[in-house]
Amino acid sequence: MRDRYGARDPRSMKLRFHTQTAGVSLTAQQPDNNVVRTTIEALAAVLGGTQSLHTNALDEVYALPTERAAEIALRTQQVLAEESGVAGTIDPLGGSWFVEELTDRMEARAEDLLGHVDRLGGGSMLTGVLRGIEEGWFQRALGDSAYEFEKAVSTGERVIVGVNRFVQEGGQELEILRIPAELEAHQCRRLQEGRAARDQQAVDRALAALVGTARGDGNLMEPLVEAARLRATEGRSSSPCSRCSGIP
């Protein structure tokens, strides 16, 4: 940000990032194993210094998570935060030659890809991205990666427990979340009723305060909390529906 775009404010040069555990790693076979996978991935994210973390539920390979699966995902984070001690030091893996070597390899590979996009755009990353989409470069890269992954799994070079090794006959019975078809219409009605009954001037003031804070140096949580309080006191709907009479 400093060298390429001339950033001067230290805040604009910070890398703040959110991590979500890998949905692609979840398997339909032996889904309880997904809890272990998610735990390892969440631990890796914390060790990597993430500021925000989302842990996938064990049943997300099938559907939206059930309440039980979502609670297990939440408890995974809480166990890591409260019992593991991993957050007791800023950089638990600092000084590890192996981690540094992997970081260097990842950085070099990322620079290669970014450099290619930069060259596609003649020095403009945005133009390079657009051209890469038009020419199918991104699609080919994703397709090649998926092919190599599947080939490694099918040959056994990459082990997926329960899929190509330690396989069990018969599947585990898993209760998944099933959303009734009539729920969408119900939520649309709630949204329309909430919009019709709310104090639009109060809503506009809350949104203006949020935008003003976002453009300045203030804490965004205060206007967000105020907007949520307004929503709660007016009995607003909790699930906006994009199909409801064009309502955003």
Image: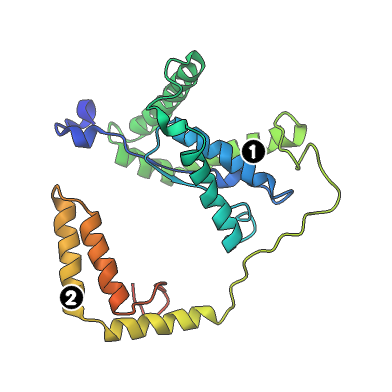
Q: Which mark is residue 147?
A: 1
Q: Position of residue 150 (x, y in %)?
A: 68, 38
Report the quarter where the C terminus lies: bottom left
- Mark 1 or 2, closer to the camera: 2
Residue at (20, 28) in percent of width and height: 2
Q: CA distance from mark 1 to mark 2?
A: 53 Å
Mark sitting earlier along the chain (1/2): 1
Q: Which mark is residue 202?
A: 2
Q: Position of residue 111 (x, y in %)?
A: 39, 25
Q: Position of residue 168 (x, y in %)?
A: 83, 45
The three-letter code of the residue at mark 2 reads Ala
Q: Is residue 141 visible?
A: no
Most foreground residue, 202 or 241 = 202
Residue 241 drawn above or below residue 194: above
Residue 219 drawn above or below residue 8: below
Residue at (53, 49) in percent of width and height: 75
Figure disc tally: 2
Q: Is residue 218 left or right of residue 45?
A: left
Most foreground residue, 232 or 97 = 232
> Tag 2's secondary structure?
helix
